[in-house]
Image: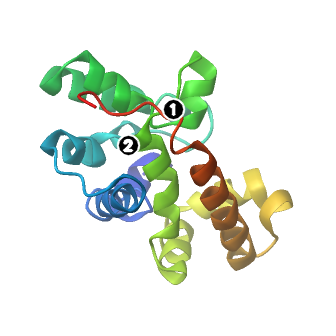
């Protein structure tokens, strides 16, 4: 089974748990998400990981496209674009501004209990890829790495939460 699929089934992008952590983060950052379109985006934004060989490599980098297509089909281009802009890497590669969904998605890493985040990423193989991309910066052990990453994400989210692309209708 491919890494992206495993992440959606039982990793940190798990189809039930991850939307909840994103919603909690969105609530903490911007207030309670009343618009049902926000909830739809929380659910579908990472579905593009299905069938991807990696999370941060060439396959995973384009995962926002599926969320865009679903949201654009259901609610129009602006909602699709807002959903697509949940990925910092995608935005950087396509000269786009990250959305408030991006900020909430990044902050979601701080919502799961540490033991659960590490267990999910270790079970899928995500932890190995994520630590390879950030162990020098954040720490050598999974706990050190996660704590360093969380501190970085809290700081990044606070600095960027008001410059992000707001959802359509704001």
Q: From this viewpoint, is residue 66 visible?
A: no
Please report the residue visible at 23 percent of the width from the left and 43 percent of the height from the top: 38
Quarter residue 51 falls in: top left
Q: Which mark is residue 21?
A: none
Where in the figure is residue 152, as x and y percent of width and height?
69, 59
Q: Identify the residue position indicated by label 2 in the image.
A: 46
Residue 98's label in the rendered image is 1
- Locate residue 111, reporting x and y percent: 45, 70
- Toward the viewer: 25 or 10? 25
Query: Is the residue under label 1 in contact with that under label 2 (CB below 8 Å)?
Result: no
Q: Residue furthest bottom?
A: 115
- Which comes before the other along the chain, label 2 or label 1? 2
Kindly tell me whether residue 85 is visible in this rendering: yes
Dot 2 surroundings within 10 Å: few (below 14), some, or many (20 or more)? many
Q: Residue at x 53, y 66 (%)?
A: 121
Q: Position of residue 162 (x, y in %)?
A: 51, 41
* Tag nearer the camera, 2 or 1: 1
Q: Position of residue 65 (x, y in %)?
A: 39, 25
Q: CA distance from mark 2 to mark 1?
A: 15 Å
Identify the residue at horizontal 56%, vertical 74% (top origin).
118
Farthest-out residue, right: 136
Q: Is residue 117 above or below residue 3?
A: below
Mark 1: few, some, or many residues within 10 Å (few <14, many ≥20)? many
Q: Quadrant of residue 126?
A: bottom right
In the rendered view, does 60 fall on the left or right side of 72? right
Q: Residue at the location (46% across, 60% down)?
A: 108
* Horizontal side, residue 51 vs residue 60: left or right: left
Question: Is 155 situated above or below 86?
Answer: below
| Mark 2, secondary structure of its residue | loop
In the picture, measured across the screen, residue 110 lies left or right of residue 14, that is right
Does residue 33 sit above or below 148 in this rendering? above
Name the secondary structure under disc 1. Answer: loop
């Amino acid at each position: 089974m491919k890494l992206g699929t495993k992440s959606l089934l039982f990793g940190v992008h798990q189809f039930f748990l991850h939307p909840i952590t994103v919603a909690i983060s969105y609530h903490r950052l911007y207030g309670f998400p009343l618009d049902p379109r926000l909830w739809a985006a929380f659910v579908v934004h990472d579905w593009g990981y299905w069938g991807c060989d990696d999370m941060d490599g060439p396959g995973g980098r384009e995962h926002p496209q599926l969320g865009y297509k679903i949201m654009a089909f259901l609610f129009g281009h602006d909602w699709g674009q807002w959903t697509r802009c949940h990925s910092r890497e995608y935005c950087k590669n396509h000269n786009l501004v990250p959305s408030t969904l991006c900020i909430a998605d990044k902050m979601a890493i701080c919502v799961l209990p540490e033991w659960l985040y590490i267990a999910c990423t270790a079970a899928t193989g995500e932890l190995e890829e994520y630590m390879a991309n950030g162990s020098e910066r954040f720490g050598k052990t999974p706990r050190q790495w996660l704590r360093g990453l969380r501190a970085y994400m809290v700081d990044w989210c606070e600095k960027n939460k008001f410059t992000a692309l707001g959802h359509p209708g704001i």
